[in-house]
Amino acid sequence: MTPSQSGRFEGDSWDPASSVGATATMVAASRALASQGPDPLLDDPLADPLVRAVGSTPFIRLIDGEVNLDDDPALNRRTRLEQMAVRTRFFDNFFVTATDGGIRQAVILASGLDTRAYRLPWPAGTVVYEIDQPLVIDFKTSTLAGLGANPTAERRTVSIDLREDWPTALRQQGFDVNKPTAWSAEGLLPYLPPEAQDRLFDDIAALSAPGTQFATEHISDPNAFSEEGVQRISERWRRAGFDLNAADLFYQGERSIVIDYLTGHGWQVTAHPAPELYQRNGFTFPEGDALAWLRDMSYVCATLR
């Protein structure tokens, strides 16, 4: 099986080997790589078997070390693994800090092959909701059950597209709008139409009690997902052996600035620039124009006032 797609359209769906689902497997493959070796940058033992279960040859070759991209400043092993470590640690720490502060309800939007419900030290009584496409949810749930993996919190799945009425589906699974929540939207926003991004933020706020926390990313460069920028992403994916066209996956067009929109809608926002988080994690930020987009990126944590 190879990752494939044929462009986005209203109501399109996917599994972990196709379209947007293949990018979730790509992320899981990077987590698997970062968890390898005597001095791993991450500890995600479930990422490797999940990627293998998807069955996409390029991803398996990647985690088996059969793909050498060290001549590419944006794709070499060190750059990829440190980038994934920074990203994963940020969202891990977000949830740990939120629950240490007393929050007992978490929602992972577009959860993909995320394994946090299985590997984070959730306090007793925590409920973790995972929202994603039905085929993605079913695949991960059945695969991890087959591996004998057990969630470390009460895990409740919501099988629905985020372009549909997911708030109603979430409430039907027992979500309590009167309790503060820890929300994450990791690597999600470019895959939503601009108006759907605003609607997502509005829905989160409408479902959230005061003290709710929200983590996502913000890329300040308005050209990051321009036609030229998306073409560069596609070229890198092809070099890695992935038959994916980013132009068919990302929604382009002018969209709200994440930090400004959240600030204007009742959130107190803290932005952590990627270079700052690299330094905090003991990494040297990579130089070169190929990673200019990353230099302009911030990881965002917001609290609802």
Image (cartoon, grey):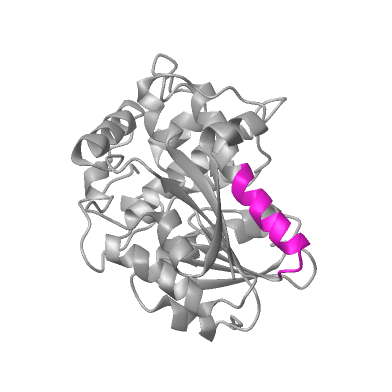
Picture coordinates of residue 191 (x, y %)?
A: 33, 55
* Residue lying furthest top: 71
- Which of the image's four quarters has the C terminus? bottom right
Residue at 66% across / 37% down in the picture?
Answer: 42
Q: Main secondary structure of the magenta part?
A: helix
Picture coordinates of residue 287 (x, y %)?
A: 46, 19
The vertical placement of 135 against 53, above or below, is below
Residue at 76% across / 68% down in the picture?
Answer: 102
User: Would you say residue 287 sits in the magenta stretch?
Assistant: no
- Which of the image's four quarters has the N terminus? top left
| Viewer-nearest residue: 251 or 254 | 254
| Viewer-nearest residue: 113 or 75 | 75
| Number of marks in picture | 0
Residue 260 seen in render:
yes
Horizontal side of 27 relative to 191 (left or right) equals right
Horizontal side of 102 relative to 18 (left or right) equals right
The vertical placement of 168 against 199, above or below, is below
* Residue lying furthest front: 264
Horizontal side of 143 relative to 231 (left or right) equals right
| Viewer-nearest residue: 91 or 66 | 91
Magenta region: which residues?
A: 89-103
